[in-house]
Amino acid sequence: MDIKFHKFDPAVDASASLVTITVPYKENQTVLETIQFAHEVTPIAFDYSCRGRACGRCAVMLDGTPVLACVTAISDGPHTIEPLVGHPVIRDLVVDKSMAHADLSRRYLRVRGSRLTTEDINTWDMSTDSNTQIIDMEWCTRCTVCTAACPARQANPAAYVGPAAMLAIAYRYYDPYDDGNRVAEAVQAGLWNCIMCGKCDEVCPQKEIKRVTSIWKELRAAATAAGYPDPKA
């Protein structure tokens, strides 16, 4: 099958181009395997590590859709593989996620007004729904595939931080040891500007995480209860 690959070396290229490489097909072949074979024919810069949806480094665009290359099967036929949108391209399929990861790390920081004690820890009921949500959100690898697919984020980045950043806010909202006003933060980050299309959950390789069907709805209910209702309602 003929695969078009994005090629761009900012050190020598004025602009990006697409090169076509013929790759053999086998049943259940992944996008990552396809890239690896093509690399043996024509060198392509790409990134990966775990091969099992644990690191998030191999995220790319497959025919315009963001995917995690290591767990995404590719069909027999022509395709186009490009770098993940929303990040500066370092070379070919490798992007610089440092700014996005720095933002996520800041949002994931726990806010405390006092030192966490053993008594505080022992008062948390591990059987609560909040604990279930936190466990599910632990699957996030910060690959940012969800944000790359978000139409609301693409339409107006200033109005909505995107699913990856909103998930970080939600993670601390469910954290019983966090003292931050995460509901207000979520509203300020564009909680009501998400169009609830579900594209983030559709493309996310971690199906344990239920943003639109559960987390976002609970955040919106909490926002309404706190006096931050949908301004468009």
Image (cartoon, rainbow, N blue to C red):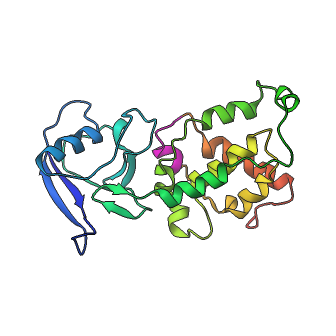
Q: Is residue 32 above or below residue 181?
A: above
Q: Farthest residue toward the bottom? A: 14
Measuring from the top left, give residue 148's x and y in whole percent: 46, 56
Q: Residue at x 25, y 65 (%)?
A: 9
Q: Which of 87 and 145 is in front in this view?
A: 87
* Residue 31 location, quadrant: top left
Q: Residue at x 43, y 36 (%)?
A: 53
* Residue 128 location, quadrant: top right
Question: The magenta stretch spans which residues?
Answer: 200-207
In which quadrant is the N terminus drawn?
top left
Residue 64 appears in the picture as rendered: no
Measuring from the top left, give residue 204's x and y in whole percent: 48, 43
Q: Residue at x 22, y 56 (%)?
A: 5
* Residue 184 location, quadrant: bottom right
Q: Which of 10 and 64 is in front in this view?
A: 10
Residue 160 forms part of the magenta stretch: no
Q: In this view, does 177 lie to the left or right of 19?
A: right
Q: Which of 168 and 27 is in front in this view?
A: 168
Q: In this view, does 191 lie to the left or right of 29?
A: right
Measuring from the top left, give residue 233's x and y in whole percent: 76, 64
Measuring from the top left, give residue 76's x and y in whole percent: 20, 40
Q: In this view, does 197 lie above or below 27?
A: below
Q: Which residue is drawn at 33% across and 55% down?
A: 94
Residue 206 forms part of the magenta stretch: yes
